[in-house]
Amino acid sequence: MIYLDYAATTPIRKEVLDLYIKTQNNFFANTTSLHKLGQESNFMFEKAKEELLEVLKLKNHDAIYTSNATEANNLGIFGFINKHQNGKIITTKIEHPSVMEAIKEAERQSFEVVYLNVDKNGIIDLEQFNNEMDNTVVLVSIMWVNNIVGSIQPIEKVIEIMKFYKKAKLHVDIVQGLGKILPLFDFNDVDLMSFSTHKIYGPKGMGCLLYNNKIDLEKRLFGSLSQKGIKPGTIDLALVVATTKAVKICIEELEENLKFVKKLNNHFREHLTNDKIIVISSIIASPYIINMSIPNVYGETIVHMFENENIYISTGSACSSKLRKIEKTIYAITKDEELSKASIRISFSHLTSIEEVNKVILLLNSL
């Protein structure tokens, strides 16, 4: 089997799984219980959260644990904007569905929304962004690394522009960037960030919203006072501990893995000789993701053809890949419906071998 859909999900690392099982077995008590076992679990919870913030070098942030990044994105967006009756929200045309659909709902309610254009590299129009920024803006939501084409947004420049508008807060979906590429910005300068553990070789069922302590998030659910009442309910301590472990490892191995995956990406591009294939992902995009199209051939057709060869790739976001619609990110970049229907995504990992890449190249070149 050749698995090249790491942008959709990743296998759990053995050391992370071992820690998860150990914690689940030995520290199963509810973190809100008053007895000794409960207090031991709560101590471990606070320690794991503190270590997570430390490894990310966050000085003034807190963490809310959710069931996935979709929930974290929604909690961050609505937990913040519901404190406002109206205002302007700025986002892009290529956000993950969990952000795009949340902001569309905000637009239906009362908020004005500006969707930034992107260029051929999938990078936002900074001039448009600068022109749209004013004192009515309450939220800017721009993903760091695009999940479809891997484009890396200039978050550092967004932060610089936003410094003149103190009312506006910045939300960044860091799912595809965390532990994979080096940020050119300081996480401390971002008000709200979302990530998912299963994208960094941790267990499924855990997402996280990192937020500046100065932000007063509205409660979206009602129940216990767990996690400051923002996300009430019983905490799965084992998932929290495993998340910290997964983040630590991916940060420690980041530079080594990035160097390796860059070589894989370059090798793939250099040896892909089929003129019918149009590579959409820019050379300056994240090396972990490469998107391409074969005009007049549905991406789903290619996916199933590869599946017959025991090779697993995708057509795009796993959260919406079954909808069989035009891939909106590809269309925003290419303005071409055919390319948007024909796109496929290959996503690499440090676990990917050069031999696996060569087999995929051979198959693509034979089409």
Image: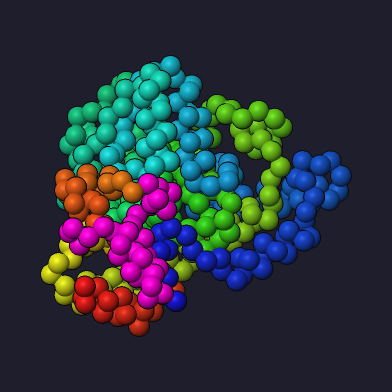
Q: Residue furthest left?
A: 275
38 or 309: which is nearer to us? Answer: 309
Which quadrant of the figure contains the C terminus? bottom left
213 or 231: which is nearer to us? Answer: 231
Q: Horizontal placement of 295 versus 47: left or right?
A: left
Q: Residue furthest top?
A: 85
The residue at the point 58 percent across, 59 percent down is 203
289 above or below 135? below
The residue at the point 33 percent across, 69 percent down is 305
Residue 334 in picture, x, y percent from top left? 17, 49
Q: How many marks?
A: 0
Residue 212 in picture, x, y percent from top left? 50, 37
Q: Horizontal placement of 332 versus 18: left or right?
A: left
Image quadrant where residue 347 sits: bottom left
The residue segment tinted magenta is 294-323
Q: Is residue 312 magenta?
A: yes
223 above or below 260? above
Which quadrant of the figure contains the N terminus? bottom left
